[in-house]
Amino acid sequence: MNTVTTTSKSSTIHGRLDLLIHSPMRLSDRLPIRLPVLLPLLASLIITGCAAPMDARKDAKYQSNASIADRPTSRPTRSLSSMSPSLMCMDHMFRQADLPTTLITSKQIPDVTGKIAVATKDMIVTALSQMSRLSNAFRYIDYEVDISRQDTVQNMTAIMLNNNQMQLQKPALYVSGAVSFVDQNIISNHFEAGTSATRLETGYSTNKNATLIGLDLHMGDFKTRTIIPGLDSANEVVIGNASQGLDLAGKIGSYGVQFNVGRDYTQGPGAAIRTLVDLAMIELIGKWSRLPYWRCLTLDQTHPELQRQLRDWYDAGRPETHSKLVKTALVGLGYMKQPQVVEPDNTATFKAILGKYQADSGMVVTGVIDFPTYERVMRNYTKLDTDGKLVPVDWTPSGELKLADVPRSMDLQIKNVQLDKTSFEVGDQIFLSTSVSRASHVYCYLQEATGNVLRLLPNATNAESLMTADVSVRIPDWINPKPGFILDAAAPGNEYVTCIATDEDVMPKLPAAMQVAAFKPIAGMSSKADVLSAFAQITGEAGLSQATVTWKVTPKTVKAAQK
């Protein structure tokens, strides 16, 4: 049976040509009708087959669009899993527990099944980084021992180590494991049905199947290269795909017509492995640190339907509603002030504010209210109801959020990589980090054992006093090759660092003696009480938050000379 498909113009013409050539009907019966179509078609076939090769220069204008056509049609988004909020929760838990910085590394995480080609080790690095963004709990030692995988950095590291020009820090922990199994199509459901008649045929089919992926990870002690008993994680996740199709075929006169309609979806293994890695790292690190990590796994934000439900809400809303929701949330988070809510979305000021929030939240900075931004903001205003369904919290259909004033808390910690963090010898370097729960202006002062008081932040290197919410600021920035200053124990006695957070920039209102350059003694001040009193006279005690850390400085130990 000759058929004519309806999918493209060219296939329709070829179908008609095939019908004319092979039909047993007389040519004279069809020639008066089909001759105007047949002759141009035959002419084009002759020209195409016999003409000389085409001139590439004539296609230059067409080809010039290639550099535009290869650009993606949508903005990039950060690769996140449903466990990302739990990773951030662990970061806050580490910060509250004052967990010391620990050096960690990992082995290559192979796929022993050979069916999933993903960079599992790099996912582990990302998970550790997300759990250390605020707390600085873990620092990953990047050193590759597999010769076939070494790159320029690793080769230079090996050369410098051999020449004693570099000292590689020894990690305390390491992660090992593998993608342990992939059971494909472990369950499958297939259904087909069809009908047949003289001039009409129909067919319907559905297909569903599920694949099971398992990941096993373990935590080991690097010093002894032994796996720590009980520090293991073995989890599975199901991915699936489904297809649905409808076929129709029939005859109109002597012509055959076919229609094929289908839809399907396939869940890839990449996102599944990332979810397993994030979950495994939360388990391993939580067990090792002996912290209640399960609290971070019972968040509503880890519900697998969260993002899909938020997408439905986003599609059902209007841009005006999205703008109100996001702006009100930014006010509650301290990124905006209430009068700025009415400011248009396309102004440079709002784009800068939104871009800062996106950067602080680990998103790709776009400066526009897109779905990733909406989804991240709305995570704070959703929960599960008694029926297990996601519902908005303090969120009205008109696009308003009912937010109470967000309280501010401040945190300041010593972050030296050593067990004894409260006692240092003269000359030892000291590393601190501070954070604030909502965007504020932050000022840090050091009281030396000698009685001098001097300002650490802001300074010439870090001139901006405004600090974003839930972002750890290192004092000094030990990762920056040019931190601007070094904080070391100066003289025996007790030393203090006090950080103060305010809503407004109060530096111009402080006494003239406090407006001297950073790292210079402030005349007339000898304690943190003097500093707090000066700030309280401007903002009032209720208008500021403060945090203080102290340490003891002991004389430097003189080692006996070796004989």
Image (cartoon, grey):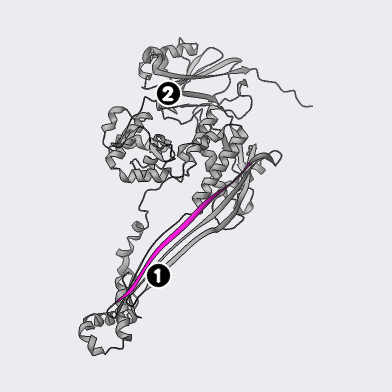
The residue at which mark 1 appears reads as: 194
Numbered disc 1: secondary structure: strand
- In the rendered image, residue 413, in percent from the top left (x then y), is placed at 53, 25
Q: Is disc 2 surrounded by few (<14), some (14 to 19) or many (20+) residues within 10 Å?
A: some
Q: Could you tell me which quadrant the C terminus lies in? A: top right
Magenta residue check for 469: no
Residue at 31% across / 70% down in the picture? 8
Residue at 67% across / 43% down in the picture? 162
Q: Is residue 114 visible?
A: yes
As drawn, 485 above or below 359 = above
Residue 401 falls in image quadrant: top left
Residue at 63% across / 42% down in the picture? 232
Q: Is residue 481 visible?
A: no
Q: Amino acid at mark 1?
A: Gly
Q: Amino acid at mark 2?
A: Arg
Q: Which residues are magenta?
A: 232-251
The residue at which mark 2 appears reads as: 408
As drawn, 359 above or below 403 = below
As drawn, 22 above or below 559 = below
Q: Which residue is outermost to the right?
A: 563
Query: How far apart are the two marked residues, 2 and 1, measured between alpha carbons?
Result: 66 Å
Residue at 59% across / 16% down in the picture? 491
Magenta residue check for 243: yes
